[in-house]
Amino acid sequence: MNTNYTSFEIPSKMEPFHWATLYNLRSLNKLQICAGFSFLVISYLTACAIYLLQYHPLARFPGPRLWILTRWPYMRAMQKGTLVHRVQEFHSKYGEMIRIGPNEISCINPQAWQDIYGGHKPGQNFGRNPLWMSRKQNTANSILSASDADHHRIRRLISHAFSDNALRAQEPILQEYVGTLIRRLHEQTKAGWGSAVVDLVEWFSWTTFDIVGELGFGETFGCLTDERHHSWSALVFYFKAASLVTSVRFYPLLERFLRWWLPSPVTNRQDHFQLSREKIHRRLKGEKTTPDFMSYVLDPRNEERMSLQEIETTFNILIIAGSETTASALAGTTGYLLSNPLCLATLIQEIRSNVVQENDINLASLGKLPYLSAVIEEGLRMAPPVPSGLPRVTPQNELFQWSAYRSPLNFSRPNELIPERWLQSNRTSQSTFDKKSTLQPFSFGPRNCIGKNLAYAELRLILSRIIWKFDLSFPKEMRAYDWAKQKTYVLVEKQPLKVRLTPRNFVKHTLD
């Protein structure tokens, strides 16, 4: 009989079972499941992309699309040390306020300093980004990680150690170590028959590290005398590993795997912290005839106190903050000076014409040299010690120092060393255009760098005494030196700065 539908028959007896039939059926089901799952994933990712690009609260800000859609390119730039350079490229392309992540904005307008980092009403200050600034559980707060109330208390106690009066009392210590630096460099030139090529990055680091060791712990690290990095100073390499770990905090599971995979000395500062703790305890048991940081913290006239744990964590941070950043500024400024002979010659003329004897170089006399101050400001603009700035959790944005300082929106000829822009007597159209309030190398507001005065003092003393004592020049292999090409892992990974030093007296003697 003909029918209009497909008919089937029930077999009179069971057909033999074939495993291949079951395998094909299961394979078909797996394909269907995979296809369905893939469809859901693609649909979800598409919806996320549409939301991020079109409907997200930050969708109106321009930026590179791949960076907006995922954190992976941001992470890779952090890991390679090129984040500040990539952000600068994006600002050049998209403008002064750009989107560099799904929920992150970078702004280079100087008003951002006040809006983001400036003081606000109690309880309304913007906190530091926990992805960048975190602390382990069950550890005491430092001056960096403390709440606003605790930070205010800790900072008020430490601020006495960085006041103008304290700096005048500490000047003999600074002069002692800078004098040791000059003496050791002069010994290098004697060994080199009148001149020597030295790596000033190392010598600057040794000097600033010894200074902050004396001021912070009451004892030197012996870097200058031994001509070597102290084991504690090797902590600067921690920042490279820390950048790697920080970069994956957007994905917690990946961070856990990375911490498990990396060797503990790379991700754990415990050994270094223990060393600083021992030095702190020795200082607390001893007495100092010359003032150091601890003298002011322990002053019995203080109504408030820091706990022992707060002292340990805060002083642990002060060592890096007070040494590595100043050494970076010195190296960057010196490198740019040697790449700009006219600026170097002008600075030499100012220092050597106003200082009769080397003993006359002190903080009071150096404060009267305007071009020296201008060179230091321009050096900090061209080579900021912390190029990325300190990201905050804000309703809108953050500020990348490197991009802000290198933007033609803020400075004319931004990639050139022009100290004249900082001279009050300069009334050129160029200096009128420059937005000088953009430059805040020590950050801004209630959490700015507490050691600003000390850093300026070290920069003036070290730079002026080297220029007064030696003639400086680049050897042939350093003439293509470019500070801007160095990688950044929170701090700058400084490459060698090899400089030929020739004592002034030696040059005059040979000419005569």
Image (spheres, rainbow, N blue to C red):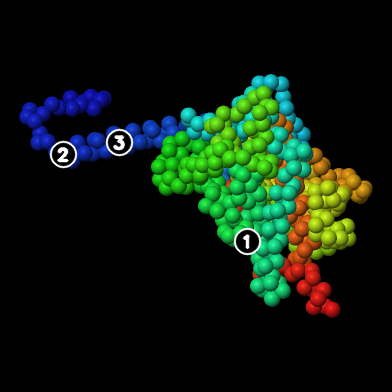
Q: Earlier in the sequence, mark 3 or mark 1?
A: 3
Could you say which disc has been placed on residue 30 in the image?
3
Q: Residue shown at 51%/36% (left/top)?
A: 250
**Residue 330: where, in percent of width, then height?**
71, 54
Identify the secondary structure beneath mark 3.
Answer: helix
**In the picture shown, does residue 257 fall above or below 225?**
above
Taking the spot 50% from the left edge, 31% from the top edge, the residue there is 139
Q: Amino acid at mark 2?
A: Trp
Sequence-wise first label, 2 or 1: 2
Work out whether 78 lies above or below 249: below
- Where residue 113 appears, as percent x and y from the top left, is 73, 35
Q: Which residue is mark 2?
A: 19
Q: Is residue 483 above or below residue 8?
A: below
The residue closer to the viewer here, 66 or 189, is 189
Q: Residue at x 65, y 65 (%)?
A: 198
The residue shown at (29%, 34%) is 29
Q: Position of residue 467 (x, y in %)?
A: 78, 61
Using the image as rendered, state which of residue 107 and residue 22 is in the foreground. Answer: 107
Inter-mark Cα distance, 3 to 1? 59 Å
- The Cα–Cα distance between marks 2 and 1, rounded to whole angstroms, is 70 Å
Distance of mark 2 from mark 3, alpha carbons?
Answer: 17 Å
Q: Amino acid at mark 3?
A: Lys
Work out whether residue 252 or residue 134 is closer to the camera in this orientation and state it.
Answer: 134
Q: Can you say which quadrant of the picture contains the C terminus?
A: bottom right
Under tag 1, what secondary structure?
loop
**Of helix, strand and loop, which one carries label 2?**
helix
The local crowd at label 1, few if under 14, some if 14 to 19, many if 20 or more residues have their Cα within 10 Å, is some
Q: What amino acid type is highlighted by mark number 1? A: Pro
Q: Is residue 430 left or right of residue 414?
A: right
In the image, which disc is placed on residue 496? 1
Q: Is residue 180 among the parts visible in the rendering?
A: yes
| Crowding near the residue tagged with mark 2, few <14, some 14–19, many ≥20 C-alpha atoms within 10 Å | few
